Every structure is written in C-alpha cells, then in structure tokens.
Image: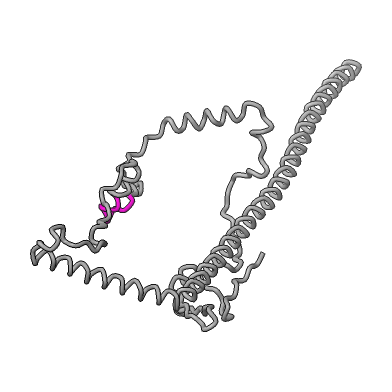
Amino acid sequence: MARTRGSTSNGSQASEPAEASSSAFTAQPNGYAEQTVNASSSIPHRDPFAYHPVDLAPTDALPYFDRDLELQPGLRAKVDALIAAEQSTMTAVDPSSSRLPPAYVPFSPRPDLRAELERVGSGQPSSHMLDTHRYTLSAPEAGADASVDEWQAAVDNAHAQLGHMDVRLKNIELLKRYGSNAWRLSNFQQEQQIRMLSEQVEALKAETNEVNRLRQKEQTDVGAKLSMLEKRWTELITRGLQLEVANITTRGEIETLQSKKRKLEQQLAQLD
C-alpha cells in the first residue's frame, strides 16, 4: 500500500499542492519547462503521497459484523422510533447561535460582484453596454462647417485609435514570438498540477480502502471472538443449570434416604 511521490522532469520530487503553487517554472529553449521547488526545509510537513500507518479509533459498534437489523424483523422500526423519540426531546439550534459557523455569503467583500451574481441568477439583462462609438473614425457631422473643437475631438480620437492599433500590433507580434512557448509552459504546469492532485487522490483512496479493510478485519475478528465467547457463555449457563438441576435432584434423593434412615432407626429402636 506504500506510495512514493512522483518525479518531475528535472528529477526532483513533487512537493505538496500548497508548495506546487509557489514553485517557479522556467522556460527552456526546447519549449518545455523546468520546475524549481522553493520549499523551506525548516517547516515540517506531511507528505500526502507516502503511506502512513492507520490508527483506528476505538468504537463499540460492529457494523461489519452486527446484522441484527437485517435478521430480526421489526427491529429497524423500533430503532427508528427510539431515535425519533430522542430527537423530539432535543431543542432546535438557533441559526444565529455561536455554535454554528457564520452563513457563507458569496463575494461578501465585493458588493459589485455580488450584485452581478444576483443579476445573472435572476436572468436580467446587463445594464453595462460596450461603447463602440469611440472605436470608429468618424468625421464631425457638420463636415467642413464644423468648429475647431469638433475637429480637434476627431483628431484626438484618431490619435487614440492609432495608439490602440499600435499596441494591438505589438501584442500580436509578441504572441507570435512567445505565445507558443508560453502556451506549452502553461500546459506543462497544468499537467503537473493534475498529476500531483491525481496522485494525492489515489493516496487518499488507498488510505480510505486501508481504513475500511482494517475496520472490516478488526470487526470480523472481534465478532468471531464475541460469537465464541457467547457460545462459551451459553455452554457455561447450560452446564450451570444442569448442575443446579442435578443438585436439586441429589438433594431430594438425600432427603429421601435420610427419611428412610430415620424410619429404620425408629423401627430398630422399637425392636430393642
């Protein structure tokens, strides 16, 4: 059942998911990435991918062995009635009680996002529309008769559109040059995270199966021992009852013999 953590592309062992988020990935010339784990050796941590001995908590229930609810008709209804009667005597917990955790409110620090979530949930259309007018190079409506301010606003809009287009061209050039490598690097990081999470899930499943297997084995062994002890107890009780019956019978025989003895003594005394 032991599991060892996997190795990354540079041979170093994979760290925990919490450490994986802080790992540094550096791009290589071949388009792949190398992972450098910045883990502090001074902080103790529990490896989720390694096998850990399972310590079962003590319990007085044997669900893997006790089948009284299945074998005895009407017992489940009695148990449910007892549980319902016990629950009826309990006082309901106030939702505002300090015993309960506070209610979760999504986007509590962001009222704008919460309002947007409520809008989407209610199916209402969005009130924020994109202003496409500023993306057009339109001349003043008055044409040659427009004022200097209107022409200046049109020229400023043209300068802004030219600046935006220049930024877009630069972004496209950067995307062509570095986009493929960045995409492969992002895919590599996501694959590593998926692999680490999958290994952690498998380790937890293995530990869960180990717990269930140990529980079943322990309860089966204890149930067999209880059955043996119950059988022994029944035998001892039966033997005790047999001894008690034998004692009563023997006592009756002794009393009968003593009675005969007294009668014989009286007859001997009369003869003398």
The structure residue drawn at horizontal position 31% and vertical position 74%, both measured from the top left corner, is 166
Nearest the viewer among 32 and 243 is 32
Is residue 56 found left or right of 136 in the rendered image? right
Quadrant of residue 238 within the rendered picture: top right
Residue 27 on image: x %, y %: 48, 80
The residue located at (63%, 43%) in the rendering is: 63
Choose between 175 and 18: the one closer to the eye. Answer: 175
Residue 182 belongs to magenta span: no
Q: Position of residue 58 (x, y in %)?
A: 57, 52
Residue 38: % across, % down = 45, 79
Residue 226 shows in this picture: yes
From the viewer's side, name the closer residue of 180 and 1. Answer: 180
Residue 109 counted in the magenta span:
yes
Q: Is residue 159 above or below residue 232?
A: below
Q: Which residue: 53% across, 72% down?
A: 188
Provide residue 12's location: percent of width, then percent of height: 56, 79
Q: Which residue reaches farthest bottom?
A: 29
Residue bounds of the magenta highlight: 106-114
Quadrant housing the N terminus: bottom right
